[in-house]
Amino acid sequence: MKGTVLIVEDQPNFREGLKFMISQSRNWIVIGEAETGEEGWQKALELKPDLILMDIHMPVMNGIELAERIHSHGMDTLFIIITGYQDFQYAQSAIRYGAMDFLLKPCSDEDISGILGSASKKLQAKRKEQQTTREHLLRSILLKYQMNQELTSHFLRMFEGCRLWLVTITDYFPEGKNYGADDLYVLQYGIYNILQELALSEDANAKLLILKEDQFILSVSSDLETACWRENAELAVREYLGIAIETVPLGPTSDVDGLMSTYAAYNEQRVHAPTVPQIADRSSKRQAVEAVKNEIMSLIISGDLQALHDYFEKVGGQAGSFPLTDGKILVINHSLALNQISEVLGLFSHQSKPAEALLQMIDQIPGAMELKSWFKAACQDFETRLDRWKQQANPYVNSIQQAIDYIEEHYLDSDLSIKQVAENIHLNPSYLSTLFKKETGETFTGYVNKLKLQKAQVLLRNTDMKISEICQTVGFEDSTYFSSVFKKHFQISPSEFRQNH
């Protein structure tokens, strides 16, 4: 899915050049243009672009004033400053208001291509984070894994102006298709991709989110014509996979209680929930994936993570003591169950593998002790991801994000301190200091310095400002200290960085 760009530039020739360059990009599409900052602001509100390219020097409202307005309204939009000015105050203001980078006039095709590439990486990372957050919020509310006012408020902000549709798989055993347990993930992956492709083909904003193994949520803007989409989705999934799905409107996201009530009522009236393919129970030591998943989920819901760890240790011990074939079947069932739970809770990992690859990997393990060691590592990875998920659901982690947001806005303040941040988010300074270190891996001072150094890199790469000026712009009072900290962090001096970039 291409990112959307708004160009705010008062020079027609340069604006046309930017449009042409962006049209050559595989990752971006221009959805609007404006000649003044005021017009750009109105277009930004109307079009909600992913990226804004804005000139500093424009009539009515200049680029810095536009950046300030975007910043003060909390708009989640990337923006790049276009300028021929190397001025100290302009650069300082642009950095303060969150400019991603600078595009200096005159600029080459390579300059534009490079900066669009950087912006594309940032956008993809942001989208991935937003997808995970949305799915976590949906599960927290609809599946009632965790509910509090803060999560509800976050949900309302993330899904503002949308309607939700529930997409349910009604049959995993279609006629003429001999699907088994090993095909489960492949089927889910296929259904997701079919629905996602259809959703993205609509002009309106539509996002498909995984709720659990047999249910997805389609989040759509209110102006989407859903009748045609529903028919095409059901037809495509049936045609390509032979599997039946049904779609049910849950309602507007502004009515959280209504969404929960409609979802609960739908599940209660379902007469035939889809039967998930199971592995045959060929010995007393071989547990069905569904039974294993229910056992693990009950431990997760209870909140007793030590009991969960003990359970994994017990299974690992059994896998190491059983005959190799029986041990592998035990590990396969548990690994498939962990993968399914990871899907339901959003515990995605680069180590997660499709069922087919997972089965091949376990099949190649040569002995019982190696099998036990492999399963232990897989469980440790799952426990780590589960702990991270629980922390994200913890209101205190949201406090850390509030602290980071405050630092981003005030890092140039000479009197910024952990006490000041703590007072702003209503936490004890000593507790915030400990929590900040635990969640970010850095001390408060280290985090602030790292942020300043990242801003300094942007100025070194894109302006002719003196290093002493950059030092002051990003909030360091002493240029010698600045250079020392910069070199310690990046293993290169500021002047060497500028020469290399």
Image (cartoon, rainbow, N blue to C red):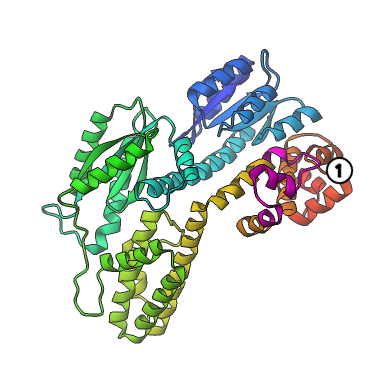
Magenta segment, prevailing SS (helix, strand or loop):
helix
| Vertical placement of residue 425 versus 202, above or below | below
- Residue 280 is inside the magenta segment: no
On-image quarter of the N terminus:
top left
Count the marks. 1
Identify the amino acid type marked 1: Glu
User: Magenta stretch?
Assistant: 408-433
Q: Could you say which is closer to the camera, residue 409 or residue 61?
A: 409
Q: Which percent across, then down, holds residue 111?
A: 64, 34
Q: Residue furthest top?
A: 60
Q: Which percent across, then down, holds residue 222?
A: 36, 27
Is residue 441 rendered to the left or right of residue 288?
A: right
Which residue bears the numbered disc 1?
477
Q: Alpha-carbon neighbours of circle 1 within 10 Å: few (<14), some, or many (≥20)? A: few
Is residue 241 rendered to the left or right of residue 208?
A: left
Q: Which percent across, then down, holds residue 485?
A: 80, 53
Taking the spot 15% from the left edge, 50% from the top edge, the residue there is: 271
Q: Residue furthest left?
A: 175
- Residue 425 is inside the magenta segment: yes
Q: Could you say which is closer to the camera, residue 5 or residue 234?
A: 234
| Vertical placement of residue 440 versus 37, above or below | below
Q: Could you say which is closer to the camera, residue 387 or residue 82?
A: 387
| Vertical placement of residue 380 versus 45, above or below | below
Displayed quadrant of residue 67: top right
Q: Is residue 491 visible?
A: no
Q: Which percent across, then down, holds residue 62?
A: 68, 19
